[in-house]
Amino acid sequence: MLYTVKELSELANVTIKTLYHYHKIGLLLPCKVSEAGYRLYGIKELERLQQILFYRELDFPLKEIKQILDGEPDRLLILSGQKKLLLSRMRRLERLVQTIDESISHTAKGEVMDKSAMFKGFDSKEEWTEALSEQNQYLKETYDYDLLKENSIDVQSMNESAIEAKRFMNGMAQGLNDGLKFDDKKVQTLIHQHINFLTHHGHETTAESFAQTTRFFLNDDFHRNMLEAQATGLSYYLCIAAEAFASNY
């Protein structure tokens, strides 16, 4: 079934102007244009619009949404990443509701609320700190490196990086499971896209430095186990693929 712009706007609760703008910037293109000039959308376009709107709920800029969707054609991976971010936001909202309830209770009693509790939930840095705590403890004990001390937590940046890391690692695991050689064009393209993401998001990464990082992952017990838990042999596969990329870059 095909939908006109008007029908799609009513179905998705977005304005016609919004759909025209998405078309103009190349974010959502119709699958065909009728002889009468009507833009028509099919199920694939509906699915893409759903993904766009999920990212808009997460306050992603349109430019970044386009980059993510164009770079990752796997709808299941996109939805999984969006679910993780939405759950994170949901937990944050739950904390905000708890803070409101406590504020109401203190106000009703004429009490002054504790200042630290007053602003609980307004920043999800606490959540990322908790998520990184195990890795950070290992790095401090093994390498005397405090990940959280050396790197300030930018919540939006961390969320975007988490989506990209999941996309990349899932892609590499899929390549391994599908029996693709480490120097297969698809595998090498995945690495190239990932390095570009890291570079464009403030992490100066070269092909050589990325290969060194994957070698560290292979030799380090904690990080190797993280990769092997996703797919047996992934740590080695990632390392030799990255080294092949660096040698040909």
Image (cartoon, grey):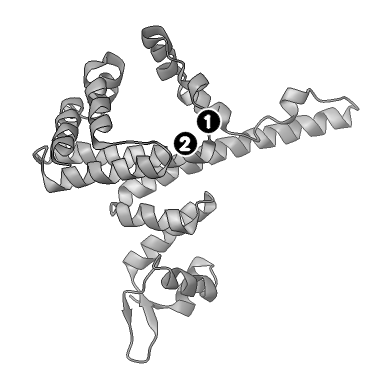
How far, Cα to Cα, is label 1 from label 2? 7 Å
**Which residue lies under the disc numbered 1?**
153
Placement of 97 over or under 60, stated as above or below: above
Placement of 73 over or under 136, stated as above or below: below
Q: Quadrant of residue 126?
A: top right
Residue in the image at 43% along x and 73% along y = 24
Marking on residue 22:
none
List x then y, in percent, for residue 19: 47, 72
Mark 1: secondary structure: loop
Q: Quadrant of residue 239?
A: top left
Q: Is residue 37 left or right of residue 172?
A: right
Mark 2: secondary structure: helix
Q: How many marks?
A: 2
Residue in the image at 88% along x and 31% along y = 108
Q: Earlier in the sequence, mark 1 or mark 2?
A: 1
Give the position of the N terminus as an image quadrant.
bottom left
List x then y, in percent, for residue 45: 36, 67
Tag 1 near tag 2, CB within 8 Å: yes
Q: Quadrant of residue 211?
A: top left
Q: Residues within 10 Å of mark 1 (few under 14, many from 20)?
A: some
Residue in the image at 39% along x and 45% along y = 200
**Which residue lies under the disc numbered 2?**
158
Q: Amino acid at mark 1?
A: Ile
Q: Residues within 10 Å of mark 2 (few under 14, many from 20)?
A: few
Question: Residue lying furthest right in this view?
Answer: 110
Q: Amino acid at mark 2?
A: Met
